[in-house]
Amino acid sequence: MSDSVLHHVAPDRYRRPLRQRVASVIEPWLYCAPVLVIIVAVMFVPLVLGVSYAFRDIQLLNPFSGGFVGLDHFRALGQDDAFFRALRNTLWWTGASVFLQLGFGLILALLLNVPFAGRGLAQALVFLPWAVPTFLAGLNWAWLFNPVIGPLPHWMTALGLMDEPSNILADPSIAMWGPIIAAVWWGIPFFAITLLAALQSIPKDLYEAASIDGASPWQQFRSITLPFLAPVIAITVLLRTVWVANFADLIIVMTNGGPADRTQTVASYIFTQAFKRLDFGYASAVALVLLALLLAYSMVILVLRQRLSDRDK
Amino acid sequence: MATMEIRSARKTYGTLCVLEDINLSIGDGEFIVLVGPSGCGKSTLLRMIAGLEEISAGEIRIEDRVVNDLPPKARDIAMVFQSYALYPHMNVADNMSYSLRLRKADKPTIADKVRDASAKLGLGALLERKPKALSGGQRQRVAMGRAIVRQPKAFLFDEPLSNLDARLREQMRAEIRKLHRALGATSIYVTHDQVEAMTLADRIVAMHGGHIQQVGTPLELYDRPANLFVAGFIGSPGMNFVEGAVELGTFVMRDGTRLPLPEGMPETLGGATLGIRPEHVTLGEGLAAEVELVEPTGHGIILHLRLAGAVFRVLTTDRRWLTPGDQVQVGLPAGALHLFDESEQRVAPAPHPQQ
């Protein structure tokens, strides 16, 4: 019985004309086509072009450049000490910036989560740095660190942190702290906003139950607040790390990679290669390496996060 | 297990006074239910006892110790929240043992106590689960288990059953009662559901507008409500009220209908309210009324009648075939009448209810 049904149905389907079968396969793609075209045009074309530069010799000042050079750029990169120093600087710059932003952002969020008079105003003020263009923020901080016009060196001297008022941006051993401080100032609001939102979603009666159970504020923080914040912290740190690693504005504006390349990160190195030396090919190769590193980092974080949330279930 | 004493307790938020002059003594092992409509201050009172709200004035004693300035953890009480407030990142066993772990109890003791409590509540198979993998009823049990393992001086319940469906609520109600009998711990239970109050309480504290209206056993409140509020709040369907006045020992309704009052009631009283419970109204001889609505409940029917201009509910197990518009006669037996004066207080002496 079922055999005969199959027999009757199956040939029917195969007998449909080819054009109709092709049309039915293509149909859904046609509906998606406008979006696909836009995505390809807007995202893939520039990406592929940019990636292709890494394998070509493109120097704006050399009209005879533009030829395919294969892996030459990457070979040069392997020999480039400046690149490896920039890589180490990037680690230091990204790690310190993100860690300090997270730390201060968390403290700020915890403070803003406690009701007090004028909290609305305080919240609005805290989020202000986020609205300042990074270019302006960089200039501002560069001036603050400048002993001729800025107060900071004088204050630090008065506090005994410095022997005499000098510009930390000019001191190779501590120059990196300048952009890091500016980046922390500028990035704290991001963590404060997201962590505050997460804090406010924690039910109050959990804390009440814990206080009745006998938990001290620190124990409540560890057993309620932190577990609630953990997923948000993981995702914001991931995002922030990628952004900060790619973030060259402050460094370019404040130190331009100097002194003695001590504040040169990979991102600012790419900028220097592309827009100062006008060697787009080499800059693209460096950018490609940075992209690969950040992708690898993101994968590791995402896998870790997945592991953690699996263990949670 | 402990006695509790609340003396002239007040709670104010700025100029707003939510609780005024609360006095209550609670015996050792007693099950007290605070009942009242939302906003009456019952939860605030419970939270003041727990230490989650400051006591604006007066004092609260637990076992002769003034606890006004003690933090919650020093009061040795356990609380079951309406939302259960289970720690979402801990499994059932960890939730229950959290307080013991904080107090650095040794592992075998913790394991014993968790096993005991989970056996009592039928949670044995769920100890490894996270709260989000539990049903509402199971979460409720875990919340109770968390309270039990601590063996506190008193249990506080803040509307613990209001998030459950009706069937489950009935079941948990019985379990809470059984548990109380087994543990014998002093319990204070907040609810807005007068059925829960009636079935659970040793004594009910009826609250309204920040004041205690009446304290007594469930039947005391039911049979001899101290004022109009308690009379209307306790019992379902609620008591019927008719406004009028007492003249020469007779109650005269607004439309002139006269009703004789039993012995011992005042001879004259201007502006009085007469009350009678729906189940005490008899169908048959008496005042003329018109049927407005018939609600079958299965074991009986609730009739909504229009009598002397007022809506009157009658609860009867008599399955009489009535339809809206029918004319009936109802009797209001003198022995079942409650009389309240102009200030809404009960007028003594109390008549004995006929059953």
Image (cartoon, coloured by chain):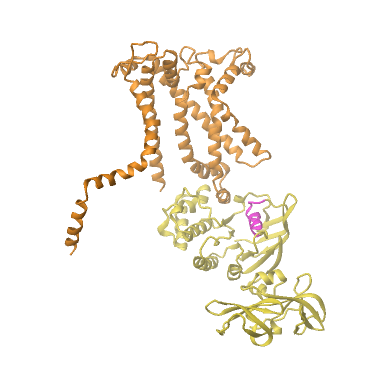
Residue at left 75%, top 83%? Answer: B257
The image position of residue A155, as x and y in percent, is: 64, 18
Give the answer, above or below, for where A247 lies relative to B214.
above
Q: The N terminus of chain A is located in which quarter?
A: bottom left
Indicate the chain coloured orange by its letter: A
* Residue B47 highlighted magenta (yes or no): yes
* Residue B314 highlighted magenta (yes or no): no
The image position of residue A266, as x and y in percent, is: 42, 21
Q: Nearer the viewer, residue A68 or A134?
A: A68
Magenta-drawn segment? B42-53
Give the answer, above or below, for where B243 lies relative to B36.
below
To which quarter of the image does residue B202 belong? bottom right
- Asked if residue A7 lies left or right of residue A230, the reply is left
Q: Is residue B183 visible?
A: yes
Give the answer, above or below, for where A252 lies relative to B59.
above
Q: Nearer the viewer, residue B259 or B34?
A: B259
- Asked if residue B310 lies left or right of residue A258, the reply is right
To which quarter of the image does residue B346 belong? bottom right
Chain B: its colour in the image is: yellow
The image position of residue A137, as x and y in percent, is: 57, 23
Q: Nearer the viewer, residue B185 or B43?
A: B43
Decide whether the magenta segment is chiefly helix, strand or loop: helix
Residue at left 20%, top 55%? Answer: A12
- Asked if residue B248 lies left or right of residue A52, the reply is right
